[in-house]
Image: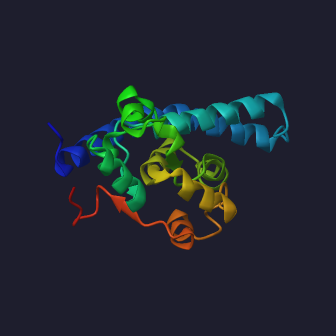
Amino acid sequence: MEKTIDQIRSEYSEEGKGFCSCFTETIWSKVNCLQRLKTVGRERSNVFKKVREALSDDLKKFTDKSVTPRASVKAFNKFKELGLGSIFEQNWNTIGSIKVMKALAEKGRNIFHHEHLQPHSEYIDSVLIKCTASHHVYCALKDYPGVCWILKSEDKEITALKFRSKRIVAGGWQEVYKIAGIEVLSIFDSNFKF
């Protein structure tokens, strides 16, 4: 039985609370280490590089929830055509499933892109590195926009417009998507229905 939009919203909200709490201290520890290394001029050291990589990995795992809260209209409609349920219930792992591959006659990852709305490197450099306490990291994680399902063709458009890794200077992900002509649906839109 397919879940209702309210069930999906609830699942995402509950999981999000747990994820923020779980990841806050480990991310704060890495941010704090990077800040100390930067203070003593060691931002080119191997330790700095490895800790930053680990921080980026943590941020990737933080966004790897069982519900993806946003999808482009085109990705939503393409997935709906397949008759496999809701794209919002898919994540990076499930989109590559046999079920999706059979419906598409190719790998789901060749069609759909699990887009991080805020590039990790930019988020680390512009937001997380400025945190001065674990509570600030918690708030930054709560504010992180997460991921969105888009089509590979839409991802290519974002890249062609040179927004692959820089979005804050462009006014944030919403402005980038507007420029790229990508309309987004969210499970949190009050008028959204399947």
Residue at image location 48% in from the left, 35% down from the top = 106
Q: Could you tell whether 36 is left or right of 5 in the image?
A: right
Residue at image location 51% in from the left, 39% down from the top = 109
Q: Could you tell whether 112 is left or right of 186 in the image?
A: right
- Say above or below: 191 vs 35: below
Q: Nearer the viewer, residue 122 or 99?
A: 99
Please say whether residue 114 is visible from this viewpoint: yes
Please say whether residue 144 is visible from this viewpoint: no
Residue at image location 41% in from the left, 59% down from the top = 74
- The image position of residue 66, as x and y in percent, is 35, 36
Dividing the picture into quarters, in which one does residue 104 lie?
Answer: top left
**In this figure, which colouring scheme has been used for the structure?**
rainbow
Q: Nearer the viewer, residue 23 or 89?
A: 89
Residue at image location 52% in from the left, 49% down from the top = 115
- The quarter of the image holding the C terminus is bottom left
Q: Nearer the viewer, residue 18 or 172?
A: 172
Residue that extends furthest to the front in the rendered view of this protein: 105
Count of all numbered marks drawn on residues in the image = 0
- Say above or below: 175 vs 145: below
- The image position of residue 68, as x and y in percent, is 38, 45
- The image position of residue 135, as x and y in percent, is 46, 45
Q: Nearer the viewer, residue 23 or 8?
A: 8
Residue that extends furthest to the left in the rendered view of this protein: 1
- The quarter of the image holding the N terminus is top left
Dividing the picture into quarters, in which one does residue 29 lie?
Answer: top right
